[in-house]
Amino acid sequence: MTIQPPVPRPLTREQYYELGRQGYFDGRRVELIFGEVIEMSPINWPHVVGCRKTAELLETVFAGVAWIGRNDPLDLTHSDPQPDVSVIAGRFENYADHPTTALLVVEVADATLSYDLTTKAELYATAGILEYWVLDVTGRELHVFRDPLANASLGITAYQSRQTFGPADSVSPLAVPTASVRVADLLP
């Protein structure tokens, strides 16, 4: 008889929310990523400023097209991330539950840059989010990911395009290609 080692079982979103209702996460900032509960790092002031500037600027850029989420959960398979900023098509009043996709997701990184450039990029690509930005407040850069594509042989989904922009550069969101966002206007 072969003894099998224990295999971790990812949590479903329903299990995650039930644990939350039972108070398991009280006093902790957590997200569900690929079925695993991840404790989030503390929020420092440059992160707050980057989030606020990004959200306010994107509210102007996407006026009449989409609404802007600020740390609002997205309902993704075995995941319930709370991106720093998300751009959701339509009006928030028209949603009966958490959105399941976004036109654009932005994570503001200071202590989490590596995680945001890898795990979070894979998460959002797997969910089919067409555009993902990582605002690196320490390195003063904006990383723009586009074109998610599944690679069956590797069993992952990744973005096919990744560009890095500095403070003097501008970028146009895919959903509003006539708009121009200056990276310096996002940075603290």
Image (cartoon, rainbow, N blue to C red):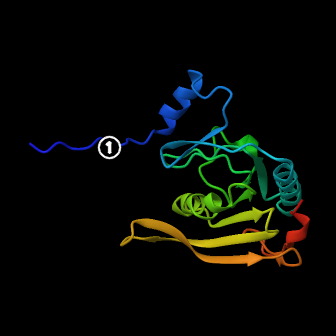
Q: Return the residue nearer the eye: 96 or 72.
A: 72
Label 1 sits on a secondary structure element that is: loop
Q: Is residue 163 left or right of residue 65?
A: left
User: Which residue, as the protein is rendered here, is positioned at the far top?
Assistant: 22
Q: Residue at x 90, y 69 (%)?
A: 184
- Compared with 124, 183 (above or below) is below
User: Which residue, as the protein is rendered here, is positioned at the far left?
Assistant: 1
Q: Return the residue nearer the eye: 148 or 30.
A: 30
Q: Residue at x 29, y 41 (%)?
A: 6
- Compared with 126, 153 (above or below) is below
- Image spot of residue 183 (x, y percent): 85, 70
Q: Is residue 159 left or right of residue 69?
A: left
Amino acid beneath label 1: Val
- Image spot of residue 101 (x, y percent): 61, 54
Q: Residues within 10 Å of mark 1 (few under 14, many from 20)?
A: few
Write down the quadrant of residue 120 in the picture. bottom right
- Image spot of residue 158 (x, y percent): 53, 69
Write down the residue under mark 1: 7
Write down the quadrant of residue 5 in the picture. top left
Q: Return the residue nearer the eye: 27 or 82.
A: 27
- Image spot of residue 34 (x, y percent): 49, 49
Q: Residue at x 55, y 57 (%)?
A: 123
Q: Quadrant of the N terminus?
A: top left
Q: How many marks?
A: 1
